[in-house]
Image (cartoon, helix red, strand yellow):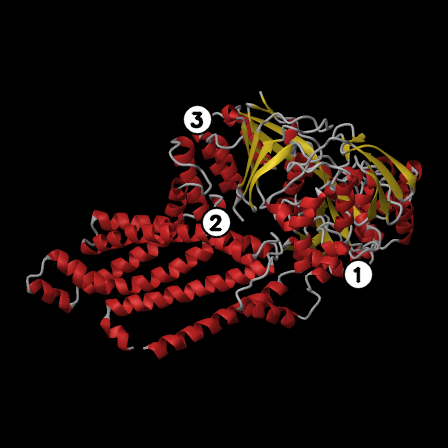
Amino acid sequence: MLIFIAKRLGLAIMVAFTVSFISFTLLFLAGDPAAALAGETASGEDIEAIRKLYGFDRPMLVQYFDWLLSAVQGDFGESYYFRLPVSSLIVERLSVTMTLGVCGITFALLTAVPLGVAAAIRPNSLIDRLALFLSVAGQAMPSFWFGLILIVIFAIQLGWLPPSGASSPMHFIMPTIVLGYYAMPAIMRLTRAGMLEVLSSEYIRTARAKGASEGRVLFRHALRNAIIPVVSLAAVQMGFMLGGSIVVESIFALHGAGYLAWESIARNDLPTVQALILVFSMFYIVFTFLADVLNAWLDPRMRSS
Amino acid sequence: MKPSWLKSSIAGLALVAAAGAASAEKANDTLRVAFTKELENVDSFFNSSREGVVLQRAIWDGLIYRDPVTNEYTGNLATSWEWIDDTTLELKLREGVTFHNGEPFNADDVVYTVNFVSKEENGVKTQRNVNWMESAEKIDDYTVRINLKDKFPAAIEFLSGPVSMYPDQYYAEVGPSGMGLEPVGTGPYKVVSVVPGQHFVLEKNENYHDSPKGQPEVTNIDIRTIPDVNTQMAELFSGSLDVIWQVPADQAEKLAEMGQFTVKNESTMRVGYLSMDAAGRSGDTPFSDLRVRQAVNHAINRQELVDALLKGKSKVVWTPCFPSQFGCEQDAAQTYEYDPEKAKALLAEAGYPDGFTTELYAYRNREYAEAIISYLNAVGIKTDFKFLQYSALRELNMKGDVPLAFLTWGSFSINDASAMVSQFFKHGSLDDARDDQVLADLNVADSSTDPEQRIEHYAKAIKRITEQAYWAPMFSYNTNYVFTNEVEYTPTADEVLRFTTMSWK
């Protein structure tokens, strides 16, 4: 088992660096980093000066391995844009994004799983239709639109919540709902489908015949099996939320890592983008790994595979 | 990109919902302002954004001050100045001024600042702002000399603009990164806190010297970065912001209709233009034919663009510089009335009776670019439209791979024609005209210390550039400022938000 984990970790690190190498190449193809750094008001001479200053005139491979050598020592360099250490920048921005991501996925699971279970217990009932409506609406509404509608209702009209910012827990309520609602439909439908399948299976009938209580049947036997694919999906969703909450962070002026990644790409802030890509890919790897462990605990048959 | 109808409908909804904006922070004497862009570094020598200029004018002072209305120069940290010769400027400094950290201001600060920023290896972001200075020397505690590398008539303009004075001891100790996190200047506002890129809190400098900027009135300025303009509007409606700026025309119009806010429109120095590859750097291109370039100039209805899209105080521009800039002689420019038939005739004459197809590049204001495309299509010029990130377009531009581009230039708010026309027509990497006659005139105009001679040669260059139709200059930009009815402010035409002149009603 330990050898298996070590192998997987080794592979994960290889994947992360492959991703970083490809992204490094792509960033160089996307535009002249010196021109981006110099900004809109720079002259050709300014840009040339910056090219020399940052060593963009060296071969790309040399630049990549330079970066790699520092990165493995935990030094991600200095942000070209902010002139601050990338590591401190990312730590600060990640705290916002992590808070938002954890709240978002929690909100999504707390609404989607009960709804999915309820919809599966009574197919075609009112609750099933409501769940279907909510999931279709969630998939159809663009995040930025939903976010602004919430702001209009809860911040402007009712005055209950602050429109944007991150200085108190109250500030996270609307962004959490928007981000969580984005992930909710898929989780809910997977829960519902899984539950429907499990509830019609032999062992559930057996459990009921043995006189187990309905609650025990549902949660101990059915949900435990139905939730397995949901765990894997939630892990991927969580990874996505950390890197992909750009729109929500922009609307609610949260200045998290997602927004930082987006802006840094536009600004060709290479050290920041590279470090973020590495961090995000690591998150994906960690989450899927944790999901496997959790699934192994839920389903003993998976442990031997 | 968000569809504009959706944005409008949200704005409309917000207007309906804004039952009554809460009162401003007048009670706490705190003015809350929004920035749209994350400012990279508060150290004014190490950023190149508009937000940076706004903070620079609040936190620091220059040696000289230019009145934004009359354009007259007066002393700020210097009380007087004189040219010793063409490349030596001697300044007498104001006595009794202290920096926010208590350091007294004197010649050592000027010498340190100038000597630091003028060295290219120190990496000042916009080299053009500082690389005309060779060094500075101290004559006595309150007299300095600035030595120029070469004759540079715009020196006074630069000293009143981007060149601020820094405290020598503190700057030597903390450098640009430290200055960015805990800025110290002599300006009307002290910095209380900086969260990089996100949040800036300023406080009135009670000991501000008798500066031409005037004394600050509002005690606290709280600036938050809010990237989305719709969110900024929501903050305004809910009473948690007092001032927003750079508001798009359609949103500003809606806000003006509400009556709860003051909406003021003011010109900026940014000019939008089409550049054409007259020199043929991008290969065999129709634009190397004068008649084709004239056709493009005749094809565009500039007034309609201004009236329908830019609105406000935007104006049609015929010069390769902003009209208020010194040397930007309007009379020298050849103008091209909107005449699609004439454009078609010129194209036919040039051998393109059925028009031709060209790549057209742009990096901002997609809607303006699309309007321009429809004018070009109407006379037979078909376009393959490429909308890129600024840095990517700039790179292509420098390589000479761009036959036709819709570009803009803001001159860094420098009120001198050299900041625009000389930027693009002196055979540098961005010059698609490469006209020797223009180069010769600009060389004289850029280095002469005789104002009359400068005007004469800028006029010659402008005449030649416009007669040869190297560009199709189109319009100036404007910006909208929106604030609550409790705020009193008159914006200026240089797009610098001045906290010092803001007050409560």
When the figure is inspected, residue A55 is found, relative to residue B51, above or below; the finding is below
Mark pair 3, 1: CA separation: 58 Å
| Residue B281 tag number | 1
| Residue A247 tag number | 2
Direction top: furthest residue:
B505
Asked whether the residues under marks 3 and 2 belong to the same chain, the reply is: no
Instruction: Give me the residue at 48% from left, 25% from top.
Output: B23
- Secondary structure, mark 1, is loop
Q: Quadrant of the N terminus of chain A?
A: bottom left
Q: Picture quarter containing residue A158?
A: top left
Q: Mark 1 and mark 2 in contact (Cβ < 8 Å)? A: no
Q: Mark 3 lies on which chain?
A: B
- Which of the pair A15/B314 is nearer the observer? A15
Q: Using a 10 Å C-alpha cutoff, classify the residue at mark 2 as few (fewer than 14 neighbours), some (14 to 19) or many (20 or more).
A: many
Q: Mark 3 points at which residue?
A: B19
- Which of the pair A169/B419 is nearer the observer? A169
Amino acid type for the residue under numbered disc 1: Arg
Q: In which quarter of the image is the C terminus of chain A?
A: bottom left
Mark pair 3, 2: CA separation: 27 Å
Q: Picture quarter containing residue B155?
A: top right
